[in-house]
Image (spheres, rainbow, N blue to C red):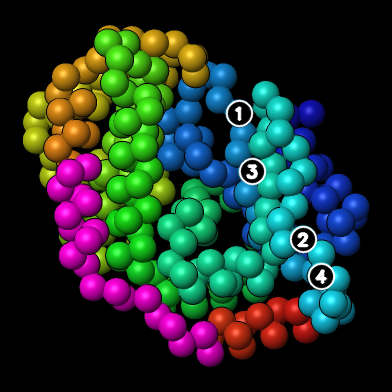
Amino acid sequence: MNIIAQINEKLDQIERTEGVRILHAVESGSRAWGFASPDSDYDVRFVYVRPKGDYLRLDQPRDVIEWQLDEVLDINGWDLKKALIQFAKGNATLFEWSGSPIVYRTTDEWAKIKDASKQYFSEKAAVYHYYGTANSTLQEYLQGDKVRYKKYFYALRPLLAAQYIEKYHTAPPVLFDDILKLALPEDLRQAIDELLEVKKRSTEGEEHQQMPVIKRFIESETVRLKEIADNLKDDHNRDLTVLNRIFLETIAE
């Protein structure tokens, strides 16, 4: 059985065992971004809905399902209500799940949710998210003489995603190649191309010498991005009318 069939079998098991209906299931992380290592695992993320009665219980079930975590598969999902609340908060991770180019299954209900979510994209929330991801990666993983090249991408991609938001004022594409269509300094672009080639041949844990061009960009861009995030206006959409309607329509199915 190939890996896609295994994933779909796991999703079927989740629906049967947990008594839920999966609305949308995708790949997240490096495979969705387009720079997986040969030994990268599969990060499967999904949004599910429970029977209507479960939302009226005093002892409501947990709003996450953590199904599997091993060397090959990392599978977990969020309840519909949790997902809609996070859309309202401008959760950048959820917008990435919604925009993933690798979709294992989806529904008409999710198409309506995805369309409505555009009203709740927050530039400020997203830029802060991408700043935080890049800065924590820089501080924790990119300080030594040798680094895992995978960690460069965990700083580069969020920084360039934030640049995309600056330019286009919308959620950035998930594929790294699409974000790379931004205008970049030639030395940085060449270094990223070299990095991608090495990454394709390297395992997750391999370490290599620092690439000064990339490290300098990450260091300077995180400083710039923090200032931008601090000065962006609060653009959260606090009118939940649309999301409330979608929630009621979906649990009524």
Is residue 224 shown in magenta?
yes
Circle 4: element type: loop
Q: Could you tell me which residue is drawn at 62 percent across and 34 percent down?
A: 42
Q: Residue beneath label 3, please?
A: 44
Upstream in sequence: badge 4 or badge 1: 1
Residue 19: x percent and y percent? 88, 61
Q: CA distance from mark 2 to mark 1?
A: 26 Å
Q: CA distance from mark 3 to mark 4?
A: 24 Å
Quadrant of residue 55 in the image? Answer: bottom right
Determine contact: label 2, label 3, CB under 8 Å: no
Q: Residue beneath label 4, please?
A: 60
| Viewer-closest of 188 and 232 | 232
**Which disc number belongs to residue 41?**
1
Residues packed near mark 3 inside 10 Å, few (<14), some (14 to 19) or many (20 plus): many
- The amino acid type of the residue labelled 2 equals Arg
Determine contact: label 3, label 4, CB under 8 Å: no
Upstream in sequence: badge 2 or badge 1: 1
Q: Is residue 182 above or below residue 99?
A: above
Q: CA distance from mark 1 to mark 3?
A: 9 Å
- The amino acid type of the residue labelled 4 equals Gln
Q: Could you tell me which residue is drawn at 22 percent across and 51 percent down?
A: 226
Residue 148: x percent and y percent? 39, 18
Q: Residue beneath label 2, please?
A: 62
- The amino acid type of the residue labelled 3 equals Val
Q: Which callout, 3 or 4, points to the residue nearer the camera?
A: 4
- The amino acid type of the residue labelled 1 equals Asp
Q: CA distance from mark 4 to mark 1?
A: 32 Å
Q: Quadrant of the N terminus?
A: top right
Please state the extent of the stretch shown in magenta in the rendering. 222-241
Residue 142: x percent and y percent? 31, 23
